[in-house]
Amino acid sequence: MKHLFEDWENIQARIQGAKNIFLFLDYDGTLTPIVSSPELALCPLEVKLLLEKLRDSPNVFLGIISGRSLEDLREKVGVPGIIYVGNHGLDIQNPAGLHQKKLSPAREKELRKILQTLQETFAEIPGILLEDKGSILAVHYRNVAQKYFRWIHEVLKETVEKWKGRWKIAHGKMVFEIRPGVDFHKGKAVKEILKGSSRNLLPIYIGDDQTDEDAFREVKGRGITVFVGPGWLTSEAEHYLKDPTEVHNFLLRCYAIRRNGSHLRVTM
């Protein structure tokens, strides 16, 4: 991967030349730093204000895509008039309405049983956090001693295997997720949102996690893909930024180019 700002002349020209741009942004680790507990990941005020400015810029579209529940994501970001994608694409809300894939009553009952089983099994593990996100159950182990990691994964595999493919395990940054055994991911959400969009639209996807790789694959070849983290890691993204501070810098540059419909040459 090439650092985005080292390739800025090319990136700037693409942003300037596009009639429309669509910014897809992950939340945790992209707009906000990774923190010890999910509820502590608050969106900084300066980021919210910048997102509002981008939303109001001519021919700029904005979507926040996260593994968080839709309700939690909307509350954390708090910017109206943009697209929110929760639970990795199970839930999509745009200004025109809500597209939400809900569990059947039978599946809800199954997930409650799984949650109860894991609560009992993991009761003695310090630092573990089980988060019920409606259609997905997240098992956060960032604050758990490393000696438990393998055992946690084995317990989850044994639990899911009892349901014969109806549930599956996915892995993010220091989190396992138990998801419905259906085909959905962030890449499919991006594809759905962009369906029917004009040719002269530049999608830009920025994310930091394994769950963003499907979206990188969807956007690569027609847009700009940016991984947030060390450039030596393997990713489908073509560029990288080191941390949320650099993401904020990039968004400032985008706003400077696109505000008032102008095509200013920006040097920073």
Image (spheres, rainbow, N blue to C red):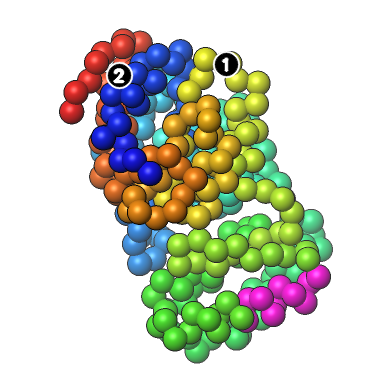
Q: Is residue 209 above or below residue 96?
A: below
Measured in 3D between alpha carbons, the distance from the residue under mark 1 to the one under mark 2, in whole angstroms, is 20 Å
Q: Please provide percent x and percent y for residue 160.
A: 71, 73
- Identified at 78% across, 72% down, the residue is 163
Q: Type of residue at label 2?
A: Ile
Q: Please provide percent x and percent y for residue 189.
A: 61, 39
Q: Please provide percent x and percent y for residue 138.
A: 56, 65
Q: Please provide percent x and percent y for residue 178.
A: 64, 65
- Residue tagged 1: 199
* Horizontal arrangement in the rendering, residue 200 relative to residue 14 (left or right): right
- Identified at 59% across, 42% down, the residue is 187
- Residue tagged 2: 257
Q: Main secondary structure of the magenta part?
A: helix
Q: Earlier in the sequence, mark 1 or mark 2?
A: 1
Q: Type of residue at label 1?
A: Arg
Q: Does residue 156 belong to the magenta stretch?
A: yes
Residue numbers of the magenta segment: 155-164
On-image quarter of the N terminus: top left
- Identified at 57% across, 46% down, the residue is 214
Q: Residues within 10 Å of mark 2 (few under 14, many from 20)?
A: many
* Horizontal arrangement in the rendering, residue 190 relative to residue 229 (left or right): right
On-image quarter of the C terminus: top left
Q: Does residue 114 belong to the magenta stretch?
A: no
The front one of 153 and 110 is 153
Mark nearer the viewer, 1 or 2: 1
Which SS class for mark 1?
Answer: loop
